[in-house]
Each structure stands twice: as structure tokens, then as C-alpha cells.
Amino acid sequence: MLSHFTQSLRETFPSRSSEWALAVIILNWSIVLSVTPDLFNDRIGYHALLQVAGQETWALLCFIVGTGRLSVLAINGAWRRTPHLRAIGAFISCGFWFGLTLGFGQNVSWSTAMAVYPVLMMLDAYNVFRAITDAAMIDNAYAGARRRGDDS
């Protein structure tokens, strides 16, 4: 299993590095929110996010999404390729980045967050597209293999 993981990582990391990075960023968000319990209360930029959910909820959701995406990327191909799960993870992350973009965009004076979060959202939107394309190729390959097996 470990040798499969390292081989799969070597083969897929270059093309999925943005997925890995964005998953780590969301996981890091969870860590920052957990170790800084008054962050949403202390800074006006986070007030819009606080209206959606409490800081603890955001931290938990970020932890689930970040670790979920990292797990999917890590087990990629152990049983079958995971582009469907990668697409779901990237789509959920798009929602997170969209929420941050809207939340920080409501401030009267925009912060540097508006230079970052919309770009991360678009990058994950591109990751959704790539994962769906990978899923279609994998599904077609499995369907072809089944047809060949049925014809034999």
C-alpha cells in the first residue's frame, strides 16, 4: 500500500498540485480558526462570515473539507481512480472560496483578501472541470473493459 501511495503521488502530484495546495489551505484555515478563538469577533472583515456560522463551525467544516480532500488525493487509485470524489471536493471548496469572497467583499474597504480568494475560487472551479474530465475518461475506460469482458 505504501509503495502504491508513493508511486501514485509521484505520477499525479505535478498535475494535481493545485488540488493539494488548496486542500492544505482549507485545513490551515481550520487550524488558524481553532487556535485563535476570537478571530471573527476581533476583526471586522470576518463579521459577514460570523453571520453565516460561528467560528467553531467554520473551523470544523474547514477541517472536514481539508482532510477529506487530502484523503481522496492520497488514496487516489488504491482501488479505483478518484476523479469523482476529487470533483466533489473541489466543488465544495469553490463554495468555501465563494463564501470568503462574498464575506470579505462586503467590507467598505476591501482587504487583500479580495486579491486572493476569488483567484482560489477560480482555480478550484478549474479543478472541478479537470476532475470531471478525468472521471469521464475513467468511466469510458471501465465501460470499454466491461464490454470487452462481456464479448469474450
Image: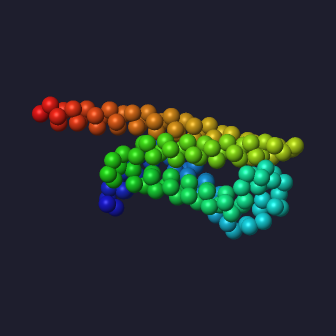
Task: Say which quadrant the N terminus sits in.
Answer: bottom left
Q: Position of residue 83 (x, y in %)?
A: 42, 42
Q: Evaluate whether residue 14 shows in this view.
A: no
The colour scheme is rainbow
Q: 136 or 70, which is in the foreground?
A: 136
The answer to which image quadrant residue 50 occupies is bottom right
Indicate left or right for 57 with 19 as reference. right
Report how many numbered discs are placed on residues in the image. Answer: 0
| Residue at horizontal 33 percent and vertical 47 percent from the top | 80
Left or right position of 127 against 38: left
Up/down of 119 relative to 13, above or below: above
- Res. 121 image quadrant: top right
Does residue 5 lie above or below 96 as drawn?
A: below
Q: Is residue 42 left or right of residue 141?
A: right
The residue at the point 32 percent across, 32 percent down is 140
Foreground residue, 64 or 51?
A: 51
Q: Is residue 48 left or right of residue 83?
A: right
Q: Position of residue 66 (x, y in %)?
A: 56, 55
Q: Residue 60: image x %, image y %?
A: 62, 61
Visible residue check, residue 38: yes
Residue furthest out toward the left: 152
Q: Residue at x 83, y 57 (%)?
A: 43
